[in-house]
Image (cartoon, rainbow, N blue to C red):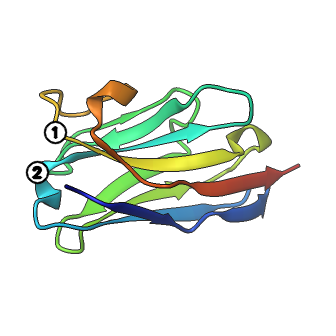
């Protein structure tokens, strides 16, 4: 069992930056691929980015490539999402997820077994 707690959300103006953190419980954090998804009002939850258990592989949605960076610190059981050059369309609830699927860097919701409660990110124009 893994419990995930996101933090770092808030309100920022367009062009600004935020850094989200996701702290995981349990001693097996390093076995899990970690991902970030987001869900805007009235829309489906969508993939944002993911990192493999070792941190050696990453994947990004086209909409955030070059602006967002995912990283992880297995010693601290934490995964981070650095978001730069934020746009109003990045406004959403951001969810952290942990997965043990065979796919090293999952881009679909079904690749993940555990989810955090979400943190709100609001980007004003």
Residue marked by disc 1: 100
Q: Position of residue 20 (x, y in %)?
A: 51, 62
Residue positioned 60% across, 25% down in the render: 44
Q: Left or right of 102: which side holds 33?
A: right
Residue positioned 25% across, 33% down in the render: 105
Question: Looking at the image, which is closer to me, 87 or 102?
Answer: 102
Q: Left or right of 89: which side holds 54?
A: left
Q: Quadrant of residue 121?
A: bottom right
Q: Secondary structure at mark 1?
A: loop
Real-space Cα separation, disc 2 to disc 1, in angstroms: 7 Å
Q: How many marks?
A: 2
Q: Tell me the crowding category of disc 2: few under 14, some 14 to 19, or many 20 or more residues within 10 angstroms, Cα based.
A: some
Question: Looking at the image, which is closer to me, 34 or 117?
Answer: 117
Q: Position of residue 66 (x, y in %)?
A: 52, 40
Pointers 2 and 1 in contact (CB under 8 A)?
yes
Q: Position of residue 37 (x, y in %)?
A: 48, 39
Residue 40 lies, with reference to residue 34, above or below; the image says above
Q: Tell me the crowding category of disc 1: few under 14, some 14 to 19, or many 20 or more residues within 10 angstroms, Cα based.
A: some
Q: Quadrant of the N terminus?
A: bottom left
Residue marked by disc 2: 31
Residue 74 lies, with reference to residue 71, above or below; the image says below
Q: Secondary structure at mark 2?
A: helix
Q: Left or right of 119: which side holds 105?
A: left
Residue 101 lies, with reference to residue 27, above or below; the image says above
**Which mark is on residue 83?**
none
Instruction: Please indicate, yes or no, whether residue 11 appears anywhere in the rendered image.
Output: yes
Residue positioned 17% across, 73% down in the render: 75
Nearer-N-terminus badge (2/1): 2
Instruction: Please indicate, yes or no, whether residue 107 appears anywhere in the rendered image.
Output: no
Residue positioned 76% across, 62% down in the render: 12
């Amino acid at each position: 069992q893994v419990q995930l707690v996101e933090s770092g959300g808030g309100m920022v103006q367009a062009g600004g930056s935020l850094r989200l953190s996701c702290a995981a419980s349990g001693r097996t954090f390093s076995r899990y691929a970690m991902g970030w998804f987001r869900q805007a009002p009235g829309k489906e939850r969508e993939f944002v980015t993911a990192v493999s258990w070792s941190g050696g592989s990453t994947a990004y949605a086209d909409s955030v490539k070059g602006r967002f960076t995912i990283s992880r610190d297995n010693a601290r059981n934490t995964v981070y999402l650095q978001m730069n050059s934020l746009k109003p369309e990045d406004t959403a609830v951001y969810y952290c997820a942990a997965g043990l699927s065979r796919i090293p860097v999952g881009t679909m919701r079904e690749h993940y077994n555990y989810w955090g409660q979400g943190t709100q990110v609001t980007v004003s124009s």
